[in-house]
Amino acid sequence: MKHLSINDIRTTNKDSRYTAIGNDDKKYDAAYNANLKTMFFCIPDYIEILYYTET
């Protein structure tokens, strides 16, 4: 399982779904929108995303 950064994902320039791994060792669903160049996910504000994996 390759660890991806947001910059790695941006270079693909395509909409896709990912799993975000938080500093609490939990997995969160995430979706990248290439038009907006934005990752969307719902996590508590005190969680830091360490990396993403492809879903």
Image (spheres, grey):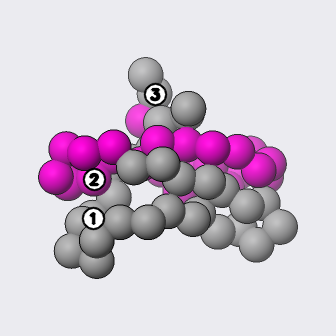
Q: Residues within 10 Å of mark 2 (few under 14, many from 20)?
A: some
2 and 1 marks in contact (CB < 8 Å): yes
Residue at the (42%, 35%) spot, across then down: 3
Left or right of 55, for residue 10:
right
Within 10 Å of the Cα at label 1, are there few (<14), some (14-19), or many (20+) other Cα atoms? Answer: few
Q: Position of residue 19 (x, y in %)?
A: 46, 42
Q: From the image, tell me which residue sits under label 2.
A: 22
Q: Quadrant of the N terminus?
A: top left
- Residue identified by numbered label 3: 2
| Residue 16 image position (x, y, % from top left) | 70, 45
> Residue 44: where, in percent of width, then height?
28, 71
Q: Look at 66% across and 56% down and name the residue there.
A: 32
Q: What amino acid does circle 1 point to?
A: Glu
Q: Earlier in the sequence, mark 3 or mark 2?
A: 3
- In the image, the segment drawn in magenta is 3-27
Q: CA distance from mark 2 to mark 1?
A: 6 Å
* Crowd rating for badge 3 (residues with CA inside 10 Å; few <14, some 14–19, many 20+): few
Amino acid type, label 3: Lys
Q: Earlier in the sequence, mark 1 or mark 3?
A: 3
Q: Comparing marks 3 and 2, which lies closer to the viewer?
A: 2
> Image height check: is 43 above or below 20?
below
Mark 1 vs mark 3, foreground winner is: 1
Q: Which mark is residue 48?
A: 1
Compared to 47, does 12 lie above or below? above
